[in-house]
Amino acid sequence: VKDFGIEKTLKNLGIKEENKGTSVGGKYFASGKTIESVSPADGKLIAKVKTSGESDYDKVIETAQKAFLEFRLIPAPKRGEIVRQLGLKLREYKEDLGKLVSYEMGKSLQEGLGEVQEMIDICDFAVGLSRQLQGYTMHSERPGHRMYEQYHPLGVVGIITAFNFPVAVWSWNTALAWICGNVTIWKPSEKTPLCAIACQNIMNEVLKENNLPEGISSVLVADHEIGQKLVNDKRVALVSFTGSTRVGRMVSSKVAERFGKSILELGGNNAIIITKEADLNMSIIGAVFGAVGTAGQRCTSTRRLIIHEDVYDEVKSRLVKAYGQLKIGNPLDEANHVGPLIDVDAVNQYEESIKKCKKEGGKFVVEGGVLSGKGYESGCYVKPCVAEVKNSYEIVQHETFAPILYLIKYKTLEEAIAIQNDVPQGLSSAIMTQNLREAELFLSHAGSDCGIANVNIGTSGAEIGGAFGGEKETGGGRESGSDAWKYYMRRQTNTINYTTQLPLAQGIKFDL
Ligand code: NAD
């Protein structure tokens, strides 16, 4: 068995055999039950975490509220300086944090490192943004009046995240939330608690070195009940939720009931349209990476290929060949393309989906299956598979968080776009074509209905500079780049009268 240096990594990141899962600033405590973090890579116990209990919750909220009163007074560019320092620390810890992501979550080491790179990128982006939290100025209809708008911080921002991006999603939210003057409380997935503790440890160093109040950054490693408390808590101004559509639907209605704000980043059912004018070499690489990268556990994973009938057979046979070359195994070993699923429950869902697909008439051209034997002791390794289906199958309409790729044939581009849009989700989409007319139709108002629409790159992944998120059951939220920062602030319109008169708007007279 290769030693991937995990012990050293854990030590460098401050992970002990037994950890406490609640932290405000540098203080750790916890009164909940103990959970175990087991690696899907080798099935070994990595460490234990005592989770946050009910009694820890109020302490965290109250400390965060107190910290907010101080933090909001620090000028935004100075808050940007704090985020800049976090970016520097992340550069220092990149190797270790990337490795922990890979070992605890199961994605390849390259993807783990890529996730940390995204954290660094969002920090850089947020630093620049901290000098650009701009509002409009408007011309008043009244003489001697000035109108403008400002953006102010919201207060406590709750961040609930999924297991599949166990560190990056935290930073997408925190980097923006902090430069906007908010304080944050993170409820990470209970499947990746050590990644959360490692991030908090890194941020604690920054807070300590800058003498900042505890409570700017807090973590609650806990089950969904503590998540529910955050959702229902009026003291939490914004809940940024990343996870399944099933849970997101509940979060959305509960937060709306109390007139809180939410950002929802939910499931996807992403497709690539491969037209007869596509570069097929690029199409195959984009499709295979999109479908099997992170073992199909990205919200942007490619789940459907919608292929023109003229190139359908060729694409199919090249896919079968490419799938035959995939190496499945320990994600820390760079020779492997595909790592494990997160846990045995996920494996069961994968098997269940294959069964359902077959029952509905799906024909598998690359068969799936669970792997066993040497190197697969965790029971979490599965074979990426490919099936020919109809878009209307119930199983195709759902997101299965596993490497199952569906092939669908089309005749006209209008039909392909209709198929692409005919699912409940609306996250990521792509077209492979060298024909300008096809590309432009796909991007037009008669084209893809997704939050992300790409030409000649796949559906998987995104850059920090663009706003990230999707429509329909994906929840409508946007994070990261462009003007996503506005979600983390409240907008205020100001009118100032610098005359000795009080003229009313719309010419209304009110003489006393
Ligand atoms: P999940 O919905 O099971 O869990 C997400 C988080 O919600 C976890 O922290 C969990 O503890 C918490 N939670 C569960 N029940 C809750 C409740 N009742 N109240 C409050 N919190 C609760 O999702 P998962 O299995 O961890 O992640 C996979 C899903 O996340 C996929 O559907 C994927 O597409 C989606 N995802 C979306 C994006 C995006 O940006 N659109 C990014 C990553 C993952």
Image (cartoon, rainbow, N blue to C red):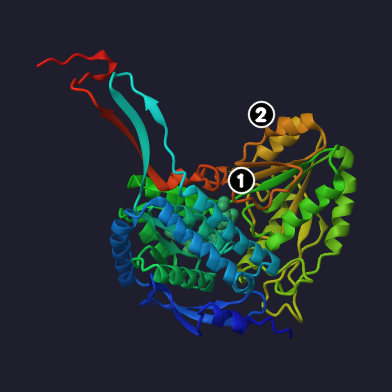
Confirm whether residue 329 shows in the render.
yes
Q: Is residue 151 above or below residue 365?
A: above
Q: Is residue 278 above or below residue 59?
A: above
Q: Which residue is mark 2?
A: 446
Confirm whether residue 104 shows in the render.
no
Q: Amino acid at mark 1?
A: Leu
| Residue 296 falls in image quadrant | bottom right
Could you tell me which residue is drawn at 81 percent across and 48 percent down?
283
Residue 160 position within the rendered picture, expressed as x and y whole percent measured from the top left: 46, 59
| Residue 380 falls in image quadrant | bottom right
Could you tell me which residue is drawn at 39 percent across and 46 percent down?
489
Residue 403 position within the rendered picture, expressed as x and y whole percent measured from the top left: 71, 59
Q: Relative to 321, is 243 on the left or the right?
A: left
Indicate the secondary structure of the residue bearing disc 2: loop
Residue 472 position within the rendered picture, expressed as x and y whole percent measured from the top left: 55, 41
Q: Is residue 251 above or below residue 346?
A: above
The answer to whether the residue labelled 1 contacts the one labelled 2, judged by CB atoms less than 8 Å apart, is no
Q: Which residue is mark 1?
A: 427
The response on whether ligand 1 sits within 8 Å of label 1 is: yes
Q: Relative to 81, is 423 on the left or the right?
A: right
